[in-house]
Image: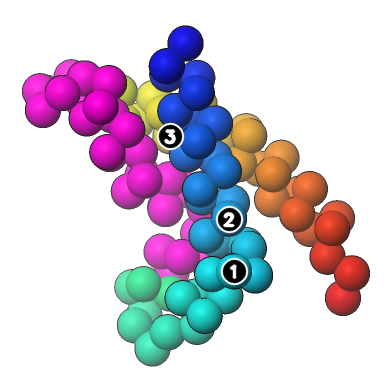
Amino acid sequence: MDFLLYALAIATIVATVTRGSVFKFCRNTNFTFLDQLLYCPYCLAHWVSVPFAVMLAGLTWYAIPVALGLVAASSLPTFLLIRYMGWLDVN
């Protein structure tokens, strides 16, 4: 159950950071790596999943497959949230 809740939390964080207007100022930096990271939901999910994997598996080798599983489990909810956020835009 914790795994699914963490995957949904990752999806929400990633969608908010990569597409939310609140973090628009962060995405408009002069750092190329940071720009690419903050615009790519899939890339950001890898970094966001690490602390959640450590909470689930501890600092063991098992945290690596847990982190990758969290990325995979959060991909569909992230996609759906980003689509929904796009529908909310009235530009």
Residue at 43% across / 69% down in the picture?
36
- Provide residue 48's location: percent of width, then percent of height: 36, 46
CA neighbours of label 2 inside 10 A, class few (<14), some (14 to 19), many (20+): some
Q: Is residue 48 magenta?
A: yes
Q: Which mark is residue 71?
A: 3
Name the residue beneath numbered marker 2.
16
Q: CA distance from mark 2 to mark 1?
A: 8 Å
Q: Amino acid at mark 3?
A: Val
Eyeballing the image, is 89 above or below 14?
A: below
Residue beneath the point at 39% across and 24% down: 69
In 3D space, how far apart are the residues under numbered discs 2 and 3 (Cα atoms)? 16 Å
Q: Which residues are magenta?
A: 36-63
Place of residue 34 in the rendered image (x, y in percent of width and height, measured from the top left): 36, 72
Q: Nearer the viewer, mark 2 or mark 3?
A: 2
Disc number at residue 65? none
Q: Which residue in the structure is indicated by mark 1?
A: 22
